[in-house]
Every structure is written in C-alpha cells, then in structure tokens.
Image (cartoon, rainbow, N blue to C red):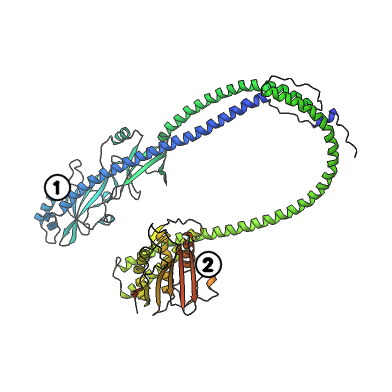
Amino acid sequence: MTRPPHPTTADRTRALPLGGAIPLEWKLPLLVTGFLATGLAVMLFLVSARVTQGAQTIVRARLSTAVQEIAASARVSIRERAAEMSAAAREPAVARALAPAAGQADLAAARRVLAGLAPSRDSTLPVELWDAQGRVVARIRRELPAAQRVPLAALPPGPGQPADAVRFGPFQPAGGSTVFWMVAPVPAEGRIAGYVAQPRGVGGPRDIARTLRQLLGEDVALFTRNADGSFWSAAPGQAGAAPQRRDSSAQGLVYHRPTGRTYAAEARVAGTPWVFVLETPERWVLARPRATTRRLAVLGLVITAVGGALSWVASRRITRPLAALTAASEAVAMGTYAQPVSRAGRDEIGRLAASFDAMARQVAGTRRELEYRVAEAQGAADELAEANQQLRVAMDQAERARADAERARGEAESASRAKGDFLAVMSHELRTPLNAIGGYAELLEMGIHGPVTDAQKLALARIGRSQAHLLALINDLLSYARIDAGQVQYALEDVPLHDALAELEEMVAPQVHASRLIFTHHVCDPDLKVRADRDKLRQVVLNLLANAIKYTPEGGSVEVACDADDHRVRVHVRDTGTGIRADRLPHIFEPFVQGERALNRPDEGVGLGLAISRDLARGMGGELEVASEPGAGSTFTLVLARAAAPAGVAIAGVPLVRAEPAATGH
C-alpha cells in the first residue's frame, strides 16, 4: 500500500482551529468570579426566602394569638351580659306582663325590670319585652327605626345551644356606629312565653388600634364582621369595608384590599354570629426581610469584587508560563517539531515543559508511522461504513417499534389516570347532594315542616334506605379510586384478632336478624395477634360478612373462624349461600365484577367490595383467597402476617379455644 503524501504547511493551517477569543488569563478570573457570584446569589436567595418565611410565620403567630385573646375577652363580656339578661327574663314580673290578663301595673313592673338592663353609656338604645311572636309588649326609651330592627326569626339559637339560651343577632349599621340585638327567652310553665330584647352598641377603647400596634410591634388593624360576611366594622364599632377577596391556604389567610394584600387571623366568638379579624399589611411584614436582603446583597457584591481581584492576580502568575508552552504547542500543531520549549523551572509547569519537549520528538517519529497505518485503516473504515448503514436501518426500525410501544403504554396510562380521576371527582360530587337528600328526608320524617302521615313515613324511609345505599356505592367508588391512585396509607401495628372480630359481631347483628340467618363466631385465642392496620382489617372482614349475609338465603348460616401457624394468621368467613361458579372465581376480585349479578337484586353494589378488600389485604402484606361450590356456599379467607410472640410464650399451631353461636335469627 502506498504511503499518503505528507501534508503541506498550508493544509495544516487550514486544519487548525481559529482559537478562543478570550485568553486563559482572562478566562480564569472570569470563571472564579462567576462561580463566586453564583454561589453568593444562591445563598442570598435562600437566606432571603428563609428570612421572609420566618417573618411571615412570626407575624401570623402573633396575629393568631392576639385575635384569640380578643375573642376570649369578648366571650367573657358577652357571657356576663347574657347572665344579666337571662336573670331579668326569669323575673316573675316579666312573666306576668306576658300573661293574657296582664294589666298596667304588671306592665309597669316589667318596665322597672327592663330599666335595670339599660346601658348607662348609651341612653338612646331601648330595652323591649316581646311576646312569643316577636311583637313588642313593653318598651323603655325610644323605638328604633324599622331598618335597625331585627325580626325574631333572624335570632335562632346558636349551634348546640338550648332553646332558652340568650341569643345574639348579627352586626348591623346604626348611623355611624354598629349595633347588635340580644334576646333572652322568658320561660313560663315549661314554655317560652316571650323575650327580653335589647340592641347593644359595639364599643371599645378609641385607641385600640394604637394599643395593638404597641403590643404586637406590627402595623395592625382590628375588624369585626358577621360570620356570613354580610357586614364589616372597624374597631371600635365604626363602619368598615369588606376585603375584595379572601384567600385561605395552609400558611394562613390573605385578604386583598384596594391598598394591597394583608395577612389576617380570625377568631369566632362562640355562641354568636361574630368573627374578630386582625390584619397587617403584607408590605409592612416584608419590609424588614427586604432590607436585610439588600444589606446582604451589598456585602455579596463586595465579596465578589474582592474575589475577582484576587483571582486576577493568581491567574497572571499561572498563565504567563503557560502562554510560552501554548506557543510551542501551536508550532507542533502546524507540523514544526524543532521549536524548543523554554523550561521555566523545576515546578509543575517546568516539568510540564520538559515532558512536552520529549513528547514533541516522539510525536515526530510516530507521526510518519501513523500516516501509513491510517491509509490501511481507511479501507477497513469503508467496509465498516457499509455495515454501519445496514445497522442504522435496523436501529431505525427498532426505534419506531419502541416508539409505538411507548405511545401505546402512555395511552393506556392516560386512560387509567382518567378513569381514576373520573371516579374520584364523581364520587366527591355525588356525596354532597346525597347527604343533603338524607338530611332533608330525616327532617321531613321528624315533622320539622309539618305532620307526616304513615304512608309518607314509609316513603321517607324508602328514600333514606336508597340514599344510604347510593352513598355506600359512592364510598366504594371513592375508596377504589384512592387505592388505585396509591393514596391509601397503612398504619401497621400488632392487633389482637379476638378483639377486632368481636367488635364486628355487634355491627352485623341487625343484618343477621333482618335476614333471619344463624351467625356463629368461633372465638380466637385472646393472645393471637396479627400485623395489620386495625381499621382496614375491620373493613375487609366487614365487607366479607356483608357479602356473606347478602348472598345467603333465609334460614342459612354465616360463621367466622380463624387459625394460625408460626408465621401466618387466617380469618375464614363461611356461608351457606348460593356459591360461585368455577368459571367466575378467577374474576370476582376484579373491579366492577360481581359473582352472580341478577336483575332481581336491585340493591346490590357495583362490584367493588371484593376488589377493595383484596387491595387492602395486599396493602397490609397479606392476601385474600376464596373457595366456593355452587349451591353449597363460599369461604373467603383473609391471610395476614402473625405478630411476633413475646419472649417465653409458646406459639400454638391452632389457637381455637371454643366455638359458640354469636347470634341467631329465624
């Protein structure tokens, strides 16, 4: 093979790169300065975020504590005033004034009692005595305008309060101030004969905002509002504007006002429709962290400038010898190997120059041999190029096949996520109206809206049962969606199996009696424990018992038993029901599949109970198994890990101690 011609100087010049536009003695200082500036910027960002977060947390904690204390103080004051009104409402003179045969003397005596409730600081607000329908029977002081009066229907008892408790109305404007109504029921002969009613003004120290600023060290504003947001007032009792928007998150409340965002804390006054709100502007909270950040930024700039100057000095000392070595290496790159390399000393750079000089002489000898071998390799390279082309075609085909498989897998995963999202969303959306249906049905059945006939009670009972059935189906859908999405958490512990199964016996007793079945509980060894989540263990066994009761005809039997070995515990739920055909057994644990679904069983579920039970069993490290014979019944077995026995306690192979019927019904 002929040796290739030696490249000329012009050829070598065209083959060389143009070189970097920035010399090394500049690159090193710039690189060091860049790293230093980046590190300081990241540190500044993290410190700023941490300082800002700490300031927000401290301010929110102060606001929350202060508004809780204000609400507690208001509750004490309200209870004192409520006690005064309740005592006045129980005066015999007040009850006599509400009697049908009450005379002027009785009314005068009642007015004297009412006069004792009149506030001294506001002589314009009246105190009134109402009958049971809210009509005024007696009054002291002037009558309020109709716009400032509150009907009796707007003053219901608070949540959890008895009917004779003092009631509090919402805040409402009264000229330039804020008032609310207090109503104390007047008991007479076991009933409410009327009410002592009094409007009260919202007061407080005029400089309460300044006092709060001094105590908290923050620019704060105190507001009171109705719980439904219908009226806002600024302390102490002056009209105030509601915020444009209210955002609530895990960090706390944020109000949006025309002046900007504010951090807020709320506290409701128990037994009233009032809420205290304490706000501070966001710009006030963030002012100090931002000032700290600015000072740190200036310090970071100074450090960056000093570091850049020092790196420049170091770079000059390092790069000067390297520049000479670079010139020699460029000559070698041009094909000139005779240029000597200056040896700058015995340090690392000097040794590098000596090594480079020796290397240049070796390269000159080996280059000629290399050129000859390159020509030989070129022929092999051509052959490899053809083979590479064929391999490239095969790889393209494999890549297309892989892309098709990835696309199919992505579509399947997207469909699965869409199914889970649909189930979760629909379950959440349907539970609210179903709960409302059940609540309204109970209210109608209780006669809240009027008498209910027996036929209507039967219809309402059917509505309640249908609502409960639908809610159970939706709960199954939601549970399955959570399990399918991997959102279920398991709290594994050592659970006494005897206690867990005994709790379920009382829960299924009504269904057993209603279906006229025989229920037998083979009691387990009291010392036998399983490694499981207590709630999910009960849920799985309860699902199995519910299925057994559902598919066992009247007169049949359902039983629960357990056995164990050194490592596993098995809970058996047996029934004498219709059983499951052999061709259906492999599919009963699949979602939306039922063992023997029939059109004459409209109260059945959607086929998720067994799927949920098996997933919960596997989530606890166990398994759910089934054995069935058509016409003879089925046996479902929950297999779980056995808890470790205490030291010195023998492990029994079969811990059954006795068998007794737990409940019977015919």
Q: Quadrant of residue 534?
A: bottom left
In this view, the residue farthest toward the left is 105
Q: Position of residue 578 (x, y in %)?
A: 46, 78
Q: Quadrant of residue 67?
A: top left
Circle 2: element type: loop
Residue 492 or 366: which is nearer the viewer?
Answer: 366
| Residue pointed to by mark 2 | 590
Q: Position of residue 480 (x, y in %)?
A: 48, 62
Residue 618 or 82: which is nearer the viewer?
Answer: 618
Q: Are marks 1 and 2 in contact (CB under 8 Å)?
A: no
Residue 242 or 405: which is nearer the viewer?
Answer: 405
Circle 1: element type: helix
Q: What residue appears at the point 82 percent right and 32 percent down from the top-left corner?
A: 367
| Residue pointed to by mark 1 | 115
Judge whether residue 555 can be spotted in this image: yes
Residue 306 as seen in the image, left or right of residue 254:
right
Report, in whole angstroms, how far the alpha carbon at label 1 lies from the one at label 2: 76 Å
Q: Amino acid at mark 1?
A: Ala
- The C terminus lies in which quarter of the figure? bottom left
Instruction: Relative to 434, say whether 373 is above or below.
Output: above
Q: What residue appears at the point 28 percent right and 36 percent down from the top-left corner?
A: 208
Instruction: Relative to 347, say whether 579 is above or below.
Output: below
Tag 2 or tag 1, which sits nearer the N-term?
Answer: 1
Q: Residues within 10 Å of mark 1 (few under 14, many from 20)?
A: some
Q: What residue appears at the point 52 percent right and 76 percent down from the top-left corner?
A: 581
Instruction: Relative to 456, say whether 429 is above or below.
Output: above
Q: Amino acid at mark 2?
A: Glu
Residue 313 as seen in the image, left or right of residue 269:
right
Q: Nearer the viewer, mark 1 or mark 2?
A: 2
